[in-house]
Amino acid sequence: MDAHSRVRYMLHKCNRARREHVASNMLFYKQFLMVKDIIITVLAVLVLFFLWVAVMDTNRFTVSNYVYKDKKIKKKFRAAVLADLHNKKYGRDNDKLYSRIESFSPDMILIAGDMINGHVGEKFEDTVSFLARLAEKYPIYYANGNHEMRMDIYRDNYGDSYDEFCRSIREAGITLLVNDRITLPEYGVTVIGSEINKKHYKRMGIVPMEEGELLAELGAPEKDSCNILLAHNPDFFEDYVSYGAELVFSGHVHGGIARIPFIKKGILSPNARFFPKYYQGEYKKEKTTMIVSRGLGSHTIPIRLFNPGDLVIVDFEGDEQQNETAL
Ligand SMILES: [Fe+2]
């Protein structure tokens, strides 16, 4: 091969190598674009799916049924437990929620607080009118949450809204229990409404209760009655156990706002704590059972994800087995 041919051969080899290199780069770039497209599509589908679930879950509720047995209960009865409605409406005038409650024919309604929003300028008339409609048919026992309490404490901001709220509630025939109780001898139960100090609603952490704090605020539980404590904040379960309530109804945590599917652990509490210990369902210790409602509405973070609203229905029964043993 002469020199000229050698140069031509070398040039040809170089060109082929360059073409192969360019082709290889093109292939890599095409594969990169394809993977990128797949990732973007998957992410977009996931975001749309999460948004769809959030819209659905923010606007629907499910029913949680419980049976509670206690030998002190004299007569079977059923209670619907409402918490954390936060002025939410399920249908016009809350008709969907009303009909669902009606379908269970409860003997009473127990409220564990935060039915309204304690936000300056926000009205509560629609919620009060919904509750008044329920009160025409069922006895209602109402304990405050932090939102009702806020209107009472910060009167410089809220004016006389709290007094107006209490007046409307009482005029509707609803029994408001602010560190107060009512004994229902027919059923053998006492309903106690707890309103704890505002320091216990601190953001980011829990300010523990002092020993005997609940006892000082509420007085001792009834000895011959099943004590049902309406206590908005479930963080203080240990204190409710020490207090000696047989059954506690709480809310406040909104089921953790978003729940992890399958594990169903609540992610965030309204006072900005991750993975709150008590966020939904039933908890038991010693002789105390606490049922935590996921609530029915939302406020500052106005979404619920994998966490629809919660209508709690509880059937109360005397412990017939124990009664038989006693006989
Ligand atoms: Fe709430």
Image (cartoon, rainbow, N blue to C red):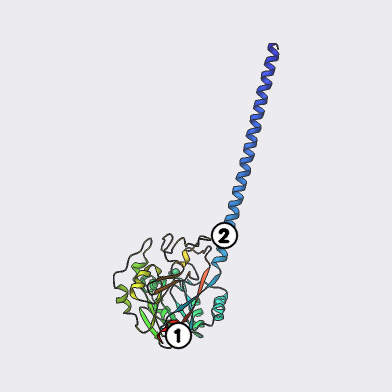
Give the mark nearest the N terminus, 1 or 2: 2
Would you say the beta carbon of the disc 2 residue lies within 8 angstroms of ligand 1? Answer: no
Please determine whether, in this image, residue 176 is positioned above or below residue 33.
below
Q: Which mark is residue 173?
A: 1
Q: Is residue 224 left or right of residue 12?
A: left
Q: Is residue 175 above or below residue 55?
A: below
Res 227 label: none
Indicate the secondary structure of the residue bearing disc 2.
Answer: helix
Q: Position of residue 284 (x, y in %)?
A: 41, 71
Amino acid identity at mark 2: Leu
Using the image as rendered, state which of residue 198 and residue 284 is in the foreground: 284
Q: Residue at x 41, y 73 (%)?
A: 289
**Residue 168 seen in the figure:** no
* Residue nearest the viewer, comparing 281 with 303: 281
Whole-percent x, y for residue 35 in the image: 61, 44
- Give the labeled residue for mark 2: 51
Residue 162 position (above or below residue 307): below
Quadrant assignment, res 13: top right
Query: How many numbered marks, from 0 up?
Result: 2
Q: Position of residue 155 (x, y in %)?
A: 36, 73
